[in-house]
Amino acid sequence: MDVQLEKRLVELRAEYENGQKILKDIELKLAELENRKKILGETLLRISGAIDLLEEVLGEGEGADSHEIKAGSETPEGEAEVPNVIRQPFEKARGILEEAGLLAGEVTEQKGVLPIGVIVGEVLRQNPKPGTKLQAGSAVDLVVASKGKFLPPDRKSSCRSFSDRG
């Protein structure tokens, strides 16, 4: 009986050592994946910021002659020119639209990776684009930045305040 117990003890120790080796391998792979995830998250954040910046620049170039359209620029025929409210806090954007004779229409939130420098509550996109002429009283749809889930979870990240993970 003692011989069988000793044999079983040797088998269990060998299994334990193999399990420990496998566990170490998995931990190393997980650490590598976490690092790759962090780098990818930061890369996506930079790409998202570049996309939004280019969309903003292209949107301004289509209908706007100046960098920012003055609020309240109504046309003589009862039309209103859509002001640029991108990167404005939502409440301020709504006020600018009202001064221009327009209303804030459908407001949606964008969660996820936000461009660098965007503060939660700021307008990311608007439809129609700045410079478009609308009937006075028409609505302009807005996309507003909200807390996202996909930013790097690194506690040292300067983007941490945008993420709802913490």
Image (cartoon, rainbow, N blue to C red):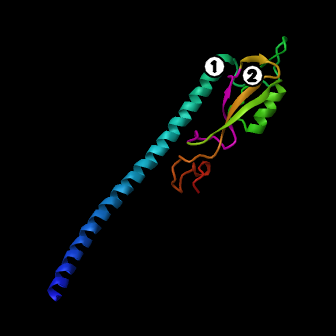
Amino acid at dot 1: Gly
Q: What's the magenta bit mostly, secondary-structure-wise?
A: loop
The x and y percentages for residue 112 are 57, 42
Q: Which residue is mark 1?
A: 61
Q: In which quarter of the view is residue 20 placed?
A: bottom left
Q: Identify the image quadrant of residue 155.
A: bottom right
* Disc nearer the start of the sequence (1/2): 1
| Quadrant position of the C terminus in the picture | bottom right
**Disc marking residue 82:** 2
Which quarter shows the N terminus? bottom left
Residue at position x 72%, y 25% in the image: 68
Left/right placement of residue 115 relative to residue 131 reads left
Q: Nearer the viewer, mark 1 or mark 2?
A: 2
Amino acid found under the numbered disc labelled 2: Val
Q: Which residues are magenta?
A: 113-130
Pick whichever, 23 or 46, lies toward us: 23
At 68% from the left edge and 25% from the top edge, which residue is drawn? 127
- Asked if 72 appears above or below 123 in the picture, the reply is above
**Local secondary structure at mark 1:** helix
Q: Is residue 128 magenta?
A: yes
Identify the element where label 2 is drawn.
loop
Q: How many numbered dots are placed on residues in this image?
A: 2
Query: In this picture, is 143 found above or below 75?
Result: below
Q: CA distance from mark 1 to mark 2?
A: 14 Å
